[in-house]
Amino acid sequence: MAHQPRFFLIVLAALAICSVGAPSVRSANADSALVPVVEENTCTPQAAENTTDSPNASPQQADIGALVEQAEAGDVRSQVRIARLYEKGIGIESDMTLAVRYWRMAESAGHAGARYKLARALLSGTGIASDPVEARRLLRLGVDQGHTSSIATLARALESDAVSPADFAEVMDLYETAVEAGHAYARYRLALLLADPESVAPDIVRAVALLRQSEAEGHTSARYRLARMLLDGTVVDADPAEALQLLCLGVESGHISSAIALARAIDTGRIVSADTGVTLELLEFAAASGHQSARYRLARLLADSDSVAPNRPRARLLLEDLIQEGYSRASFTLADHLMAVRPSPQDRAQALTIWTSEAEQGNGRALARLARHFPNDYVRLLQSELAHRGYYRQRQSGYLTLATIEAITAFCLDTDISDTCRLGPMRSATARALAGAMGPLGI
């Protein structure tokens, strides 16, 4: 792992918080028995692929030339083996196009594993043009053959497009079949569906049982989801002590989402006393992976002059990078950051541009910021919108004239927000109420 010494210190700091915050929910022997796990974003049905499709001989020992000849001659086993070599790039240059070619050969002979691999390639568009319809056809053939990973992958593919109760019922039936065969990812996905109060057959008791089973086997995503449920207390009774321990185990295994959730819980003091130093270390670790939410939270912490290690220039760079990546929350926060401490004319201009754009989209907080920091621009924006709606017919000067006040008052009366508007047109509460009543401007 990159930056291992630093990560070790982060784990120590987090576990120190955990040991203080709650008693252990598992024995030391249970901890030592945890099996290695994968990150949530890599936890896909592919992780539980049938191992019977792997070549018996080590790829390094295979006579690739002879293997290609046998594959071209129609030997299905050789087709599967050479496809794997091309897929993994072991002993030969990786080439997904050729991997797909040999999977297609083996699939035409009815090989379930090759059919599954080809379907996944068609779903992702890797080595071949994306074709979800054909992918699902192949997966259904795999289901008929009893291929467990095909069952789980078809369920996941159908889940993403499910709309009607019948759609979700089919998805859950497929997951149930895969779970009966011991498929770990299917068990995790089924638990999430059962935990959803709006699913076709919610069963929170069984959902928690499935998550606990997966967590005990070292499934990091299941551990994280279970911790979130116990922390939020929305679908199960809240248990901050167990949630804390589960998140700490996730951090210990390097799970990014667990680190972010633990940082937030520590920062807000929800399960232990707030410790900004540990929060900062956890967010630094998660941000190093490129995680947008972690980088956003880190930027906010660094921008806080009362934090343990404020760094406003770095906070600004983080927020600007996030804006370039399209992270919507970063723009508003950057504007706040720019105006916080003696803004330069350039900073004020940039903040004005951001808040104006947000206000035009119906953001009440942005309109309130304009009222506070840029009153003339705020009034001009209101004059423009009220003119568009037929309430104001004077020059859009940006000055709070009697005609402007009368137009605002009339609009407030027509939209039933008069009680708030009586506070005054320049008050933040009024600005937010006006934004709520107007919605996106100019429409």
Image (cartoon, helix red, strand yellow):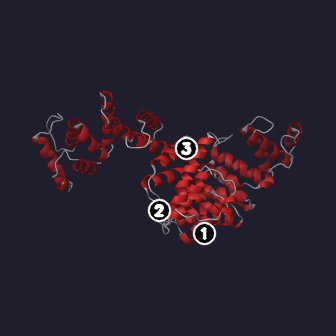
| Vertical position of residue 292 compared to residue 348: above or below | below
* Along the line of sight, the residue nearer the viewer: 100 or 312: 312
Residue 328, given in percent of the width and then of the height, sits at: 42, 42
Q: How far apart in space, not on screen, are marks 1 and 3 (Cα)?
A: 31 Å
Q: The C terminus is located in which quarter?
A: top left
**Pointer 2 with pointer 3, Cβ within 8 A:** no
Residue at 58% in and 63% down: 24
Q: The disc labelled 3 sits on which kind of residue?
A: Phe
Q: Secondary structure at mark 3?
A: helix
Q: The N terminus is located in which quarter?
A: top right
Q: Is residue 304 left or right of residue 62?
A: left
Residue 170, given in percent of the width and then of the height, sits at: 60, 64
Residue 167 in view: no
Mark 1 or mark 3, which is nearer to you? 3
* Along the line of sight, the residue nearer the viewer: 223 or 205: 223
Q: Secondary structure at mark 2?
A: helix
- Determine crowd level at label 2: few under 14, some 14-19, many 20+ residues with C-alpha closer than 10 A: some
Q: The disc labelled 2 sits on which kind of residue?
A: Asp
Question: Mark 3 or mark 2, which is nearer the start of the sequence?
Answer: 2
Residue at 51% in and 50% down: 260
Residue at 52% in and 66% down: 199
Q: The disc labelled 1 sits on which kind of residue?
A: Ala
- Determine crowd level at label 3: few under 14, some 14-19, many 20+ residues with C-alpha closer than 10 A: many
* Along the line of sight, the residue nearer the viewer: 155 or 290: 290
**Tag shown at residue 232:** 2
* Along the line of sight, the residue nearer the viewer: 305 or 296: 305
| Vertical position of residue 175 compared to residue 399: above or below | below
